Image (cartoon, grey):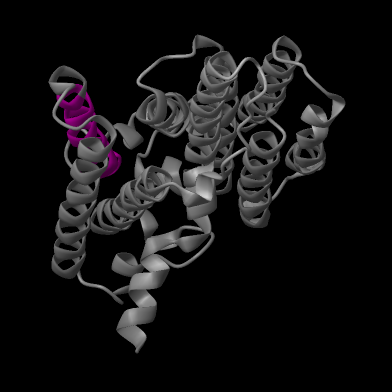
Amino acid sequence: MKKIKAWFAAARLRTLPLSVSGIIVGASAGLLHKTNNLSAQLDTEFGGTACLSGRSILESPLFWLAILVTVGFQVLSNFANDYGDGIRGTDAKREGELRMVASGAISPKEMKIGMFITGIITFFLATVLIFIAFGNQNFIISFIFFNLTIVSIVAAVKYTVGKKAYGYSGLGDIFVFLFFGLLSVLGSYYLFTHYFNWQLLLPAIAIGCFSTAVLNLNNLRDVNNDAAAGKNTMVVKLGINKAKQYHAFLLFFGVFCAIVYTVLNYQNPWQFVYLIAFIPFVLNIKTVFKNTIPKLLDGELKKVALSTFLFAILFSIFMC
């Protein structure tokens, strides 16, 4: 029982709502695009009298497969982070939740096996997702998504594992922004539509900024330990004061991009209801700027992550 609890702790389930936020936004936009196109086609065929009721993404196998694949990537990344920081000694005096390899609850060998199994399962689910989305007719697109799957798996592992782990050179922010923002939103939209809507770059940037802000909070909390262990995160490079300004910029710029997208696609005032989710962001920024003891920021990670998840849900529900 203790070992099972240790594996659940290593998976860090509290990070999962944040990881699926981009999928929710992209899949909702993709399904709306398909619904509107089919509705327009029916209206044309039946003299403008036909209509199609909105279909929930919860009924879509593509959506659930995309969610499972994203969760797989996140869990793999969490396992790799636990393993990489554990064997380097970075987690020896870290703040926040206990890490399993560093604490001895899971051995490095066991964690490597867990990473391998998680990677295989995620790769299989991604292959099924690609086949269902594109079939045999779009070989080039399938090949591109197949390679993106491999790149995502490698990126999840290389964050803290290996001699050139990019998390130790301050590049983690860029990868989180790209994978949890742009790729998550635009990629899931393309799975549904086989089409790029470049306006979706705006909500994709928003999700990317919010996800990067969570990582920045994590690095603000661990700044002293990371600096001592030679982990040169963006916070270590910028310094605490500039990292706080960077944090505020990420949240405000994300909000700005979401609002611009809504204005460009405005249909009714309910489309702005997602602004409710930004209230915790403002409170978080105030807390961050007042903070003088980094370890006390641990509780703020969950607040920003859940606020991002709430934004994704409200944004998607009132998209049309």
Residue at the far bottom in the pictured view: 1
Query: Where, by quadrant of the figure, is residue 289 drawn?
Result: top right
The x, y position of residue 94, in whole percent, is 46, 58
Q: Is residue 147 magenta?
A: yes
On the rendered structure, is 125 left or right of 223?
left
Q: Could you tell me which residue is drawn at 23 percent across and 50 percent down?
A: 125
On the rendered structure, is 62 left or right of 222?
left
Q: Could you tell me which residue is drawn at 43 percent across and 24 percent down?
A: 186
Q: Is residue 123 magenta?
A: no
Q: Could you tell me which residue is drawn at 65 percent across and 43 percent down?
A: 313
Q: Nearer the viewer, residue 146 or 117?
A: 146
Q: Nearer the viewer, residue 68 or 44?
A: 44
On the rendered structure, is 314 left or right of 1?
right
Query: Where, by quadrant of the figure, is residue 50 drawn?
Result: top right
Instruction: Say above or below: 83 vs 169.
Output: below
The x, y position of residue 109, in whole percent, is 13, 67
Boundaries of the magenta span? 142-161
Residue at the far right in the pictured view: 269
